[in-house]
Image (cartoon, coloured by chain):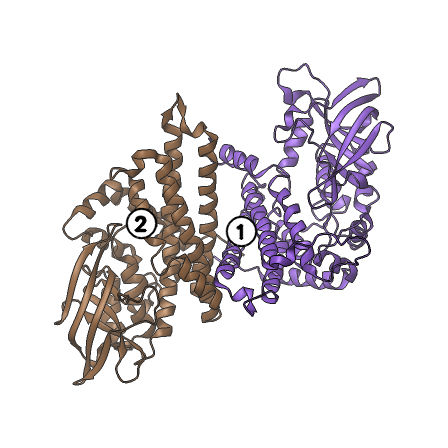
């Protein structure tokens, strides 16, 4: 038993770390570190830097631009990105839509979409949730009716992350409302966001930010060639995507960086003339969190080790999602708590000038991170998955 | 990076499991616990035959030269089966001091006996007001004649009534530091108040009054034993973490089985989501505990320095202590009133997990140590 990376893996990590140090632009690094708002340009600039280096889609097959790295190398690269603090790679195109196209797409669809995803020419978003369909996704109602060579789509998607940046949306739509098993009436469509009849309305979250949207479809014409997989097989596609490449959902690297930052904040904030981190009550909370993160990192590596034989990730990735998001939330909560009264300022009023204090961003961030246990299959849905798939209940 | 046992470790794990299935099921354990001695000489003999008693000791003394990782699977199996024999007390504590600090003569006198199953040991360290502080030792050692005179009191010494040989910590009257001594349990002036612990182990409070031992009873350098005690107790803590993982696994397996068979409102109670989510959290606790036991055992074998070892093993014990409490409490709750009874093994596992959570320091103790290391 050896919990350490091999010499080759360490060399790979050092190579990646050095490359990231040299190639992550300072302004982007600062923005991520200070929890600044990342614009579309920021996100795509980083995307294109990685694309140029050939590393934007490591998991893809080599013929489409993948790196040929093994699971351990892919994990190391993603964790290093998290640790150094790069802007995120938006997963909707690179990870999700690409995975679907590679598995179910026609050659023509692959050729049409994959290179543009790789190069960052198209920004994608995901049309899954609807006002009446959250955790119970299969109840979705957005309707697509076939007319000769196209579908006419009517309905509404919601919680659509970054739809206001998007050129394309992949959607689950109902093509057959008559089938007894409702999962069998669903299809998977790729829709150009510039198509007439689509409108996007922002949903502002409690941190004041515009991140998610409602997307309305009003007689939107979608060519049949934009359907992936057979009509009525959209649920198969969705289920495939659920189990795909989620070994990094623990986000260990990013949480390690945040933990270091929490300790830094707690070392600077004073209590009774001494650093807060020396206060036993606060310190023990930080320690417990560090222990949880260490345990999750080793658990993640144990799962990874099991995959080296070529086994595909199973329901155990739900454990990573549950613990990873709980840890992320706890980090934001303790940071806000460390800031104490300084966590209260939110937005300067007109003419007052920007805040000097970094602590001003911590409460909104705490608010924002409540999303993590809700999105991508709420943690309760993850528990249902474990209960059914691992425990057989 | 590799989390598998090697071939030898796998073979060992298999043979321990076979032994448990054949000779140490719950019914057999009940008989052992109910016996006057509270341990099984037969089982101990089998441990010796299987090589378990020599696992971590040098081949020079009949052992196999293994480390904590080699003992992991044994401890996990013992945890699952709730083995009550003083394996950790002897192999993980008492004899470890001899192996790590003994003279050639001491090793030759003690270790082959331990490996052969003829000598059981216990570590007499804890004192009434010391809690988990290993540096707090009030028992005294004075030079007398050519040897030493020991006085003081020890408490909750696991395995003491069964052991033939104790390792006793005492503060040197001259040098001031802590020293370790080999003391025969039947030596004059050693008085035991023996008892059963809540988790069915045998233990004792010990009073030492004018106990005289020879010069050759001193283990290691006079007054300089604290670092060694920290090292051995860290290693034993890592092994205890592995034992906890086995006991947690049993609690989870038994609870899952119960949820699939126990019916209420016409359906197995495992159909209820309120209960499903609770056992899922128990499974997550198990995975996290297992990961930390791997960390503790690998660091017990190969930490680069004492600080790294202390930090990692305290981190592991924090997680293990939390997981022990969480899983044991939920296992009983999900078994309902049945979980409260002597009849079900889960109540015995509850008791063992409850005590493991505190053995060698509870979460609070290790949180403090983790932060200061």
Q: Is residue B243 visible?
A: yes
Looking at the colours in the rendered structure, which chain would you say is drawn in brown? B
Q: Nearer the viewer, residue A151 or B42?
A: A151
- Seen in the picture, residue B122 relative to A115 is either above or below; the reply is below
Q: Chain of mark 2?
A: B
- Seen in the picture, residue B265 relative to A254 is either above or below; the reply is above
**The quadrant where residue A24 appears:** bottom right
Tell me residue A301's x, y (percent).
55, 52
Residue labelled with disc 1 = A296
Drawn colour of chain A? purple
Which mark is on residue B352? 2
Residue at the left extreme of this rendering: B188
Residue in view at x 51 percent, y 61 percent: A283
Which mark is on residue B343? none
Tell me residue B37's x, y (percent).
16, 53
- Seen in the picture, residue A156 relative to B252 is either above or below; the reply is above
SS for dot 2:
helix
Q: CA distance from mark 1 to mark 2?
A: 25 Å
């Amino acid at each position: 038993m050896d919990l350490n990376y091999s010499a080759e893996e360490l060399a790979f990590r050092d190579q990646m770390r050095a490359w990231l140090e040299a190639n992550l632009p300072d302004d982007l690094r600062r923005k991520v570190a200070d929890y600044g708002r990342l614009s579309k340009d920021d996100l795509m600039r980083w995307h294109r830097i990685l694309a140029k280096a050939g590393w934007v889609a490591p998991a893809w097959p080599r013929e489409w631009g993948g790196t040929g790295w093994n699971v351990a190398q892919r994990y190391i690269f993603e964790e290093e990105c998290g640790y150094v603090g790069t802007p995120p790679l938006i997963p909707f195109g690179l990870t999700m839509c690409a995975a679907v196209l590679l598995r179910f797409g026609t050659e023509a669809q692959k050729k049409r979409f994959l290179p543009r995803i790789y190069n960052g020419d198209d920004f994608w978003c995901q049309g899954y949730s609807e006002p009446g369909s959250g955790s119970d996704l299969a109840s979705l109602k957005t309707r697509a009716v076939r007319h000769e060579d196209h579908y006419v789509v009517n309905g509404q998607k919601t919680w659509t992350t970054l739809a206001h940046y998007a050129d394309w949306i992949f959607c689950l739509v109902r093509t057959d409302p008559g089938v007894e098993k409702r999962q069998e009436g669903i299809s998977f469509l790729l829709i150009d966001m510039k198509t007439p009849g689509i409108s996007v309305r922002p949903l502002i979250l409690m941190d004041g930010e515009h991140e998610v949207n409602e997307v309305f479809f009003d007689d939107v014409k979608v060519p049949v060639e934009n359907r992936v997989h057979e009509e009525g097989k959209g649920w198969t596609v969705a289920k495939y995507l659920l189990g795909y490449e989620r070994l990094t959902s623990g986000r260990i690297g990013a949480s390690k960086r945040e933990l270091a930052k929490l300790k830094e904040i707690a070392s600077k904030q004073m209590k009774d003339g001494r650093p807060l981190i020396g206060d036993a009550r606060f310190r023990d909370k930080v320690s417990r969190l560090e222990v949880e993160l260490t345990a999750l990192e080793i658990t993640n590596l144990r799962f990874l080790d099991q995959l080296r034989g070529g086994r595909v990730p199973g329901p155990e990735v739900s454990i990573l999602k549950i613990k990873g998001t709980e840890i992320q939330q706890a980090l934001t909560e303790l940071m806000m708590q460390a800031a104490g009264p300084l966590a209260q300022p939110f937005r300067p009023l007109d003419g007052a000038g920007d805040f000097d204090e970094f602590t001003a961003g911590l409460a909104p961030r705490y608010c924002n991170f409540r999303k993590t246990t809700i999105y991508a299959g709420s943690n309760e849905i993850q528990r249902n998955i474990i209960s059914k798939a691992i425990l057989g209940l | 990076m590799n989390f598998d046992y090697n071939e030898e470790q796998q073979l060992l794990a298999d043979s321990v499991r076979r032994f448990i299935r054949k000779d140490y099921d719950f019914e057999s354990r009940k008989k052992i616990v109910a016996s006057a001695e509270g341990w099984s000489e037969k089982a101990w003999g089998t441990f010796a035959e299987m090589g378990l008693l020599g696992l971590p000791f040098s081949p020079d003394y009949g052992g196999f030269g293994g480390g904590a990782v080699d003992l992991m699977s044994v401890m996990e199996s013992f945890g699952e089966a709730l083995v009550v024999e003083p394996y950790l007390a002897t192999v993980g504590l008492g004899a470890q001091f001899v192996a790590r600090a003994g003279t050639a003569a001491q090793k030759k006198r003690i270790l082959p006996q331990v490996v052969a199953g003829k000598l059981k040991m216990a570590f007499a360290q804890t004192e009434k007001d010391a809690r988990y502080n290993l540096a707090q030792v009030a028992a005294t050692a004075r030079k007398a004649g050519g040897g030493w005179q020991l006085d003081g009191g020890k408490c909750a010494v696991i395995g003491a009534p069964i052991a033939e040989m104790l390792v006793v910590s005492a503060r040197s009257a001259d040098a001031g530091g802590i020293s370790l001594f080999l003391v025969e349990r039947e030596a004059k002036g050693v008085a035991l108040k023996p008892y059963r612990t809540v988790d069915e182990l045998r233990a004792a409070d010990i009073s030492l009054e004018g106990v005289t031992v020879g010069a050759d009873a001193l283990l290691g350098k006079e007054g300089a034993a604290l670092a060694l005690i920290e090292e051995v107790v860290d290693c034993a803590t890592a092994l205890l973490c592995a034992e906890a993982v086995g006991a947690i696994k049993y609690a989870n397996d038994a609870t899952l089985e119960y949820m699939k068979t126990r019916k209420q409102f016409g359906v197995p109670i495992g159909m209820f989501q309120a209960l499903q989510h609770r056992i899922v959290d128990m499974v997550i606790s198990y995975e996290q505990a297992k990961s930390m036991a791997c960390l503790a055992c690998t660091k017990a074998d190969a930490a680069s320095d004492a600080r790294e070892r202390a930090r990692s093993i305290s981190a592991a014990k924090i997680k293990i202590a939390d997981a022990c409490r969480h899983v044991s409490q939920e296992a009983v709750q999900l078994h309902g009133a049945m979980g409260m009874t002597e009849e079900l093994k889960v109540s015995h596992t509850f008791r063992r997990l409850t005590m493991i959570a505190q053995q060698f320091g509870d979460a609070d103790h290790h949180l403090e140590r983790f932060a200061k290391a």
